[in-house]
Image: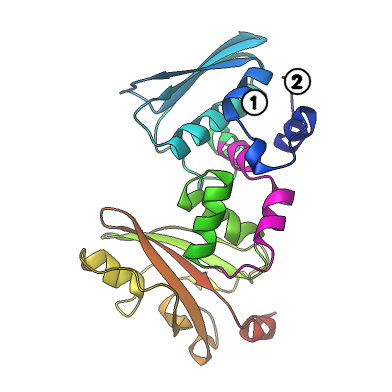
Amino acid sequence: MRRNITPEGLWQQMGIVSPDDVDIEVMAYFCGARVKYRELTSCAARIVGKGSKAIITVDRTASIERQRFSIAHELGHWAQDRGQVSASCRSKDLAPFKLKDYQDDREAAANRFAVELLMPAQLFMKAAQGMAVTMASASYLARQFRVSLTAASIRLVELGSFPAIVVCSNLQGYRWSWRHPELPLSVRVNRLISRHSVAHSLITNAGLASPGPVTVDAEEWVSHPGVEEYVVVEDSVRIGRGTVLSLIWWEDETSLVKLE
């Protein structure tokens, strides 16, 4: 692998034109890295490389989606540190939402590489064009690109056709969020999860099933002048014990146009 190679460049070099063609192990081999599966306890994945060869080891007990993201993440390290690299990455490092400040953070940069390698912008935008920002859409895209629901939801918000925010919350409250790049900065996500939101109901009632997309007052999720005058669509699902992922979608963009 040459230095500073981009995920898009790798797709082009390998002649890949569809998510169905992506074999992450073959991509790793193309880059000079062999993939091994072991039961790991001290880390989620690691890479050791020197010269033009590297070995990537991933946790064999992890889900297929996590294994694929781990391999892509380690390839991100290989692209950064071609020549000599040794890195052990923990589960908290392998988080698709940890993409910010990736120019100054090695783990965030590897995550950005993984996201763009597994879900190239051009292909993802084509697949998501015109899709409603719902968990059904995210699930469809997750299956198509063989990534986790969280990763697909983030990419759908980042590259989708409509302004939206994805929010993760748990019993302790707000954990993280990711927004569409064109969403006005004056729209701020509330740090307290409203008791009137579906997310709060799913967090506090383990037996409750997700109702799918519902219309809620926008002020339940965001704050800015005039927020009390309109509604948004919320679609929340559990992604773990006590943890909920929510897609917040502006189906009617009139209120955002006024802000701009």
Majority SS type along the magenta span: helix
The residue where tag 1 is placed is 27
- Residue furthest to the top in view is 51
- At a point 57% along the width and 69% down the height, the residue shown is 164
Q: Which residues are magenta?
A: 111-133
* Location of residue 209 with respect to 64 vertically, above or below: below
> Is residue 190 found inside the magenta-colored segment of the image?
no
- Rounded to the nearest whole Å, what is the CA distance between mark 1 and mark 2? 14 Å
Residue 172 seen by the camera: yes
Left or right, 76 with respect to 217, comes to: right
* Label 1 environment density (alpha carbons within 10 Å; few <14, some 14–19, many ≥20): some
Camera-nearest label, 1 or 2: 1
Name the residue: 56% across, 73% down. Answer: 187
Q: Amino acid at mark 2?
A: Arg
Three-letter code for the amino acid on which mark 1 is drawn? Met
Residue 244, quarter of picture: bottom left
Report the residue marked by disc 2: 2
Q: Quadrant of the C terminus?
A: bottom right
Horizontal side of residue 236 vs 97, given as left or right: left
What quarter of the picture does the N terminus occupy? top right
Pick whichever, 108 or 205, lies toward us: 205
**Element assignment for label 1:** helix
